[in-house]
Amino acid sequence: MEKIGMTKPKLKKNRITQVFASFLVLALSVTLTGCAGINRKESKKIDTSKEQRYAYPLATASPEDTVTQIYAEKFAEEVKKLSDGRIKIQVYPNSVLGGDRELLESCYDGDVPFVVQNTAPQVNFIPDTAVFDSPCVFDDLEEVRTKVDDKTFLSDMQKSYRKAGYELLGYADQGFRVMSTNRKVASFADFKGQKIRTMENRYHLSFWKCLGANPTPMNFSEVYIGLQQKTIDAQENPCEVIVSNRLYEQQDYVIETNHLPHLISLIVSEKFYQQFDEKDQKIIRQAEENAKVYARAAADDRNEEKIEEIQKSGTQILTLDEMTRTEMKKASAGVREAIRKKVSKKIADAYMGEK
C-alpha cells in the first residue's frame, strides 16, 4: 500500500533509515543462511523440531495502521499458534527492509522470506499479475474474493508465481480503489480533463486516458502537496489510504469509481518454502487462510469507518449511476484487451470472462 512520504527536510533521516535497513537485511540474511540454509543451492530441509533461535522476517512497505499490517500480523500469530510455537515470524512494516521492489528481490533471494504487498508492483516480476490491473471487471467485492479464491484460478496463479521464484499463499484486499477529486463527477463527461495522479503503471495510465482524464504519474510522497498546491485535481486509492494520509483534507469529493480491487498478496520465497516438510507447509497454508478471513473482515469494517470519517470531514462521497459505470466499462475495453495479450489466456478468461 502507498503512503505519504517525507518532506525534503527529512530526507537525510530517510537515507539514514535506508542505510540501517541495509545492515538489518544483511544481518538477517546471514542469520537465516546459518540457521535455515535459504541461500544455499542444496534444498536442505528446515529442522523445526529444534528451538528456533531467530524469527523469520516478514516485510511490508505499508504503515502499521493498515489491512496489510493486520494480514501480516495475523499470519505470524497463526503460524506460531498452529505450530505450537515452533515456527516464529517477525513482521517488519513501513518499508523498514525496503520498498516494494526491494522486497520482491529480497524475497526471491530468500533474505526476507515472507512478503505482504499489493499486486501492482509484481507485474515486472510475475507478468500474469497484470490481470489484476484490468479495470471495470467487478462491481461487487465478494465477486472478486470468490474469483481469487477459486481453486483452479488460484492454482494457475501459483504456477505463475513459482515460475518467478515465489510461492503464493493467498490474497486479502483493501476493498476497491476509488477516486478523490475537487471536481464533481456526476456523469462520464465529468472525467474529462481532470488531472489525476496515478501509479507509474501503463495500464492505470491508459484507463484514465480512456475516460478523458489527464493522468499524471507521481511519487505518492508528493500527492498531498500536489493536491494542496493544485498541480493535480485528483488521485485514486482505497478509502483506507485516503484517510490514513489525510488526503480528504484537500479534496471536496470521493467518487466511488470502484474501478479496481486493491488486492494484497502474501508470498514466500519458493526456495525457502520448499525447505519445510509437508506438515509445516500445511501449517503455513492454513495460517494464511485464517489470516485472510480475518483481514477481509477487518477490511470491511475499516472501510465503513473510513467512509464515516470522510463524510464527517465535510468531503462528499458520490456513487456513480449505472449509465456512467457502463460508459466507463465500454471506454476501457481497449485496456482489458491489452492485458489479455500480455497474460495467460486461461488466467485472463477466468478473471475477466471468456472473450
Image (cartoon, rainbow, N blue to C red):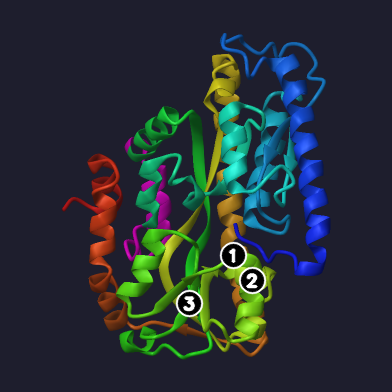
Q: At label 1, which amino acid type do we have?
A: Asn
Residue 321 higher or lower than 170, as above or below: below
Q: Amino acid at mark 2?
A: Glu
Badge 3: residue crowd in 10 Å (few <14, some 14–19, many ≥20)? many
Element class at badge 3: strand
Q: Is residue 84 visible?
A: no
- The residue indicated by pointer 1 is 219
Instruction: Locate residue 334: give its quadrant.
Output: bottom left
Report the front residue among 145 and 181. 181
Q: Are marks 1 and 2 in contact (CB under 8 Å)?
A: yes
Residue beneath label 2, please? Answer: 222
Identify which residue is drawn at 76% across, 22% down: 30
**Secondary structure of the residue carrying numbered label 2:** helix
**Left or right of 331: which side holds 203?**
right
Marks 3/1: CA–CA distance: 13 Å
| In this rendering, position of residue 162 left or right of residue 113 | left
Q: Position of residue 291 (x, y in %)?
A: 61, 43
Query: Cβ–Cβ below 8 Å for labels 3 and 1?
Result: no
Distance between the alpha carbons at the discs numbered 1 and 2: 6 Å
Q: Say the numbered circle drawn on residue 196.
A: 3
